[in-house]
Amino acid sequence: MLATGAAVTSALAQVDREKIYQWINELSNPETRENALLELSKKRESVPDLAPMLWHSCGTIAGLLQEIVNIYPSINPPTLSAHQSNRVCNALALLQCVASHPETRSAFLAAHIPLFLYPFLHTVSKTRPFEYLRLTSLGVIGALVKTDEQEVINFLLTTEIIPLCLRIMESGSELSKTVATFILQKILLDDTGLAYICQTYERFSHVAMILGKMILQLSKECYLRLSDNSRAREALRQCLPDQLKDTTFAAVLKDDTTTKRWLAQLVKNLQEGQVTDPRGIPLLTQ
């Protein structure tokens, strides 16, 4: 009985394997590529050697790059549709698989394939198709830096990934900010990456400014939420950092209307129900 069960499992695995081969072959044909992209992107976690199979099969990587290049015209002006975004993100998911695998990572870098993704990271449209496109593109770079390999950092430092990540950290969606911050952190944790960022004052100050704005924005969101509670509001009047009350961050927030609005709301919340003396000066309460 056990032998029969094992035979059935083996037969099913072989059928599944044959389907993988079929879909990989279909990637080189524009007529059959879309379905193959969808099916293979679903299987990428369950097929350990999918990356070498993709890399070494004839015409496959060229087909994936063709998917990427085909939507460049939809970037500017920004006309990318949800269908286009989903399709190219399936191609990017397969490239992430190749970037993650130790047998194909070096060749992936040597072919400079990450550079094909940078036009997507340059986009600024806030629509869902573009947000999804940026996030998936960042995922490919994130898969590279996750390995902590020196050749990955060396490659990225020859590209514009640092300013691209900084811009996304400043104005991207929450998920994109998280991945961009992870990439920058991995670069900073590498000695070569740290030396590169600190090589000039301009590089260091840009990184420091964006990190400062992110911390400020996060802290203000938390403080603003705390100020919705009456007991917390009383405590915040005593312990809120002076830097959030004075003009310390005025220059940093000059063009950041969202954070300035949060700060104004926080100050307003803390002023509500506050006891003042005849001169309008707040009185300390017990």
Image (cartoon, grey):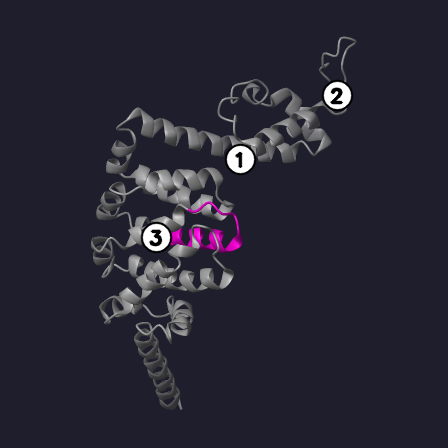
Q: Secondary structure at mark 1?
A: helix
What amino acid type should be assigned to the residue bearing mark 2?
Gln
Give coordinates of residue 12: x percent, y percent. 38, 84
For label 2, the crowd category at 10 Å Cα-Cα, with few meaning under 14, some 14 to 19 and many 20 or more, is some
What amino acid type should be assigned to the residue bearing mark 1?
Leu
For disc 1, the marked residue is: 218
The mark nearer the N terminus, 2 or 3, is 3
Q: Which residues are magenta?
A: 123-141
Q: Quadrant of residue 111?
A: bottom left
Q: Do residues under tags 2 and 3 come within 8 Å of each other at their CB atoms?
A: no
Front residue of 183/70: it is 70
For disc 3, the marked residue is: 117
Q: Do residues under tags 2 and 1 come within 8 Å of each other at their CB atoms?
A: no
Give coordinates of residue 117: x percent, y percent. 34, 52
Main SS category, magenta section: helix
For label 1, the crowd category at 10 Å Cα-Cα, with few meaning under 14, some 14 to 19 and many 20 or more, is few
Above or below, comparing residue 186 to residue 4 in the picture = above
C-alpha distance separating marks 2 and 1: 25 Å
Residue occupying the far top of the picture: 279
